[in-house]
């Protein structure tokens, strides 16, 4: 018997991929190295910019690169795939058709978690990139769950915060932008906030909010843990 191994499509950005590893690591009660979960990680910061492709319309399509990464991970022995980038989930259909193993969809996982604690028709405030909104990354999952989305009023400010975190890491200014957006959406009727950008996940532990918060990275880490705990012959 051997343990299942999740393959991670990483590098979008690198720090977010490391954060996912840390969240997975924290879930395991270990007394030795062998107690931890194995991961296969394709850390590829050269994946074409999702923002350039979806917002600016100036960059190449990331989908072929992501599909190739998925195939490499499957060939290396991955039994499922994970991708700690919310915006890149726009390309999930192309990834899924390129392989024969499951794709652990962090968007679907987070929305399902929200639906478990909200009544139908409730609103979720999405702390996300404007590319996530433009591409409708959460639309289908929210529709299936009977939930509505609330977005920050100044999406340009959210994008500026994401770019700042990618360049300089978590900063007090980025934290202030995120906190202001969280407060605005809570006041605007959001019953729950969803951290739906892996750069923002770096700031989420210190985020003050008057309503509950779900982080898509946490939902993905849970799914990795569950998949990896299953045994295969």
Image: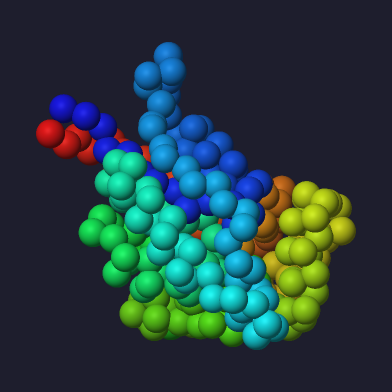
Q: Is residue 39 above or below residue 138?
A: above
At x 82%, y 51%, the residue is 168
Q: Residue furthest top?
A: 31
At x 60%, y 81%, the residue is 54
At x 44%, y 56%, the residue is 69
Does residue 87 appear anywhere in the picture? Answer: yes
Q: Which sits in the foreground, 192 or 72?
A: 72
* Quadrant location, the N terminus: top left
Q: Which sits in the foreground, 34 or 70?
A: 70
- On the image, the x and y values in percent for residue 133 come to 58, 81
Does residue 120 appear anywhere in the picture? Answer: no
Q: Residue furthest right?
A: 173
Q: Which sits in the foreground, 113 or 82?
A: 82
Q: Is residue 222 above or below residue 58?
A: above
Query: Number of marks in the image?
Result: 0
- On the image, the x and y values in percent for residue 182 come to 70, 67
- Picture quadrant of residue 5: top left
């Amino acid at each position: 018997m051997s343990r299942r191994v999740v393959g991670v499509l990483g590098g979008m950005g690198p720090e977010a991929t490391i954060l996912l590893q840390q969240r997975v690591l924290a879930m395991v009660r270990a007394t030795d190295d062998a107690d931890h979960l194995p991961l296969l990680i394709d850390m590829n910061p050269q994946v074409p910019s999702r923002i350039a492709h979806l917002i600016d319309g100036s960059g190449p399509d990331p989908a072929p690169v992501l599909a190739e990464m998925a195939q490499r991970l499957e060939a290396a022995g991955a039994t499922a795939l994970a991708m700690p980038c919310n915006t890149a989930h726009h390309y999930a259909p192309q990834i899924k058709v390129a392989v024969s193993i499951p794709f652990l969809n962090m968007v679907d996982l987070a929305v399902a978690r929200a639906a478990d604690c909200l009544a139908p028709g409730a609103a979720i405030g999405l702390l996300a990139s404007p590319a996530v909104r433009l591409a409708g990354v959460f639309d289908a999952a929210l529709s299936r769950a009977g939930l509505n989305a609330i977005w920050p009023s100044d999406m340009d400010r959210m994008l500026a915060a994401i770019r700042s975190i990618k360049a300089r890491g978590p900063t007090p200014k980025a934290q202030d932008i995120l906190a202001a957006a969280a407060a605005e959406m809570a006041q605007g009727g959001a019953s729950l906030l969803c951290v739906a950008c892996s750069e923002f996940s770096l700031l989420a532990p210190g985020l003050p909010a008057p309503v509950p918060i779900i982080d898509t990275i946490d939902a993905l880490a849970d799914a990795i843990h569950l998949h990896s705990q299953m045994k295969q012959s």
